[in-house]
Image (cartoon, helix red, strand yellow):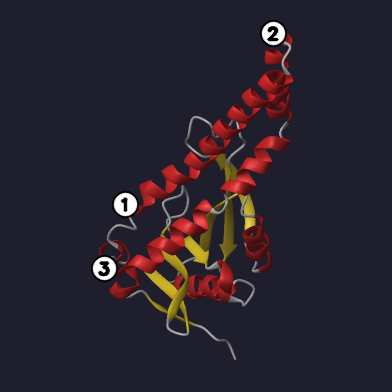
Amino acid sequence: MSDYTIRLYKDCDYDTVRELFAEGTLEHTRVAFKHGLSLTHIRIFLLAVFLLPFFTTGSLSMSFIVLLLVLTAMWFGTRDLYDSYVRHSLSNDMLDIQKYYMQRDGYCFWVAESLGKVVGMVVAIPSAHPGGENHIELRRMSVAESHRGRGIAKALCRTVIDFARRRGCSAVVLETTWGHRAAHGLYKSMGFIWQHSTFLKHPLAKYVDFKFLFYKYDIST
């Protein structure tokens, strides 16, 4: 028997779900930063950053200082990719959850609760993607790190799929960042199929290879 329940969002969940969303999003900064350092053009750039001050000053310490400063700038630049996304979300759909998700047709917000505490969340909205007139989009799914591996994410996914099926929709679609690799495995195991990828609309997105992956789950008629 599971130690959690999936239920509809309540106003008393507001602060917790906003915090859960922000923490779940920002924790991917480290993965994105490490991925950026693995890119060939980034490594060449960092090598040039190290060698230039050494050849101009002959100082290894100066080279290391400059490299450290550039790496720090890259870290905060990567962090800003996620910070800007969180700020935008918290000031838009996550600002008035009741009005945006619970009072509109085709929208819904669920939470996973364990021992009286909200430990997961997911939302459903009518898809705005081209060709998705009869699709539901799964968004904002997050599970607290302390409660992962208990099947909560799968239960939240099934909740959205069942919601779409009851509404007579033909598919559930979603977007996730390439760095959220555990989620990719989850979605594939549940029958979601990768469709295509797009870059985040941010000046640094293409430089650090920051992509969104689009998945689709076809609902059997």
* Discs 2/1, front: 2
Name the side, left or right, on which 117 lies relative to 177.
left
Q: Residue at x 58, y 40 (%)?
A: 210
Q: Residues within 10 Å of mark 1 (few under 14, many from 20)?
A: few
**Residue 194 against residue 192 in the figure, above or below:** above
What amino acid is at disc 2?
A: Thr
Name the side, left or right, on which 42 lies relative to 137.
right
Figure disc tally: 3
* Discs 1/3, front: 1
**Residue 151 placed where, x, y %?**
61, 76
In terms of depth relative to the viewer, which is nearer, 191 or 25? 25
Instruction: Look at mark 3 in the image and give the residue it sits on.
Output: 103
Instruction: Look at mark 1 in the image and give the residue it sits on.
Output: 92
Instruction: Look at mark 2 in the image and give the residue it sits on.
Output: 56
Label 1 to label 3, Cα distance in Å?
Answer: 15 Å
What amino acid is at disc 1?
A: Asn
**Residue 43 placed where, x, y %?**
72, 28
Q: Residue at x 30, y 69 (%)?
A: 102
What amino acid is at disc 3?
A: Gln
Secondary structure beneath label 3: loop
**Disc number for residue 43:** none
Q: Quadrant of the N terminus?
A: bottom right
In terms of depth relative to the viewer, which is nearer, 221 or 125? 125
Q: Residue at x 53, y 31 (%)?
A: 204
**Residue 183 against residue 60 in the figure, above or below:** below
